Amino acid sequence: MAIINRRRVLQFGIAGACALASGPVFANGHARELSFENLHTDEKITFTYWENGEYVAEALKAFNHLLRDHRIDEVLSIDRDLFDQLHRLKTLVRNDEPFQVISGYRSAKTNAMLARRSGGVSRRSYHQFGMAIDIRLPCTRLRDLRKAALSMKAGGVGYYRRSNFVHLDTGRPRFW
């Protein structure tokens, strides 16, 4: 039988407050965390990528590697604004599941090959510059993810219902 006393209640109260404070908050001074699952390589990572007012180099390096062009194993630095968009998006839809990545960085060679195969791939894709990602988020309906992304007015938002993903980029705000 557990004994509940004032000290025990205060301990749980403080622990609960700390747990709430450490959750995803998009404000100065609070940590920002992202989780990814690359559907092509089966790699999964979770990192706090921003804390104490700055980006965490180790986390960015890990994200860049996971989001690499897996076809030729080429890594490029991903635009930090894209990570901030993804953090805002997961906060808006209140979902901490890992983003499932369909496509991150694509080399010019890979992009040209995909453009030849599909009319839906731009020859000047933002993916080539580390400024775009194609994702879905488990437990969030695709149309809700798109709606939340559009509400941010932070860049391009593409809705690929039949292919089951949403495209985000850090270009000018637009949608298709």
Image (cartoon, rainbow, N blue to C red):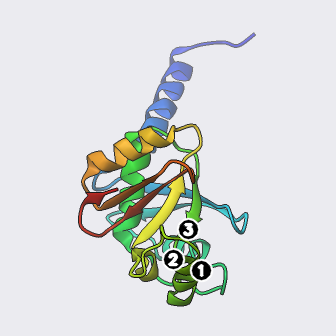
Q: Name the residue under label 2.
A: 105
Disc 1 + disc 2, Cβ < 8 Å: yes
Q: Report whether 30 appears left or right of 105.
A: left
Kindly indicate the quadrant of the structure image that contains residue 68.
bottom right
Checking the image for residue 84, the label placed there is: none
* Visible residue check, residue 51: no
What residue do we see at 40% from left, 57% from top?
158
Q: Position of residue 103 (x, y in %)?
A: 55, 68
Q: Residues within 10 Å of mark 1 (few under 14, many from 20)?
A: many
Q: Distance between the residues labelled 3 and 1?
A: 8 Å
Name the amino acid type tagged 1: Asp
Task: Reply above or below: 170 against 90.
Answer: below
Please tell me how crowded label 2 is: few (under 14), some (14-19), or many (20+) other residues with Cα within 10 Å: many
Q: Position of residue 132 (x, y in %)?
A: 42, 69
Location of the N terminus by quadrant is top right
In percent of width and height, residue 8 lies at: 56, 21
Q: Name the residue under label 1.
A: 69
Residue tagged 3: 103
Q: Do the residues labelled 3 and 2 touch (CB within 8 Å)?
A: no
Q: What residue type is labelled 2?
A: Tyr
* Residue drawn where x is 51% and y is 48% of the image: 161
Secondary structure state at the residue bearing disc 2: loop
In the displayed structure, 158 sits above or below 60; it is above
Where, quadrant-wise, is the C terminus in this rendering? bottom left
Horizontally, is 27 left or right of 106 in the view?
A: left
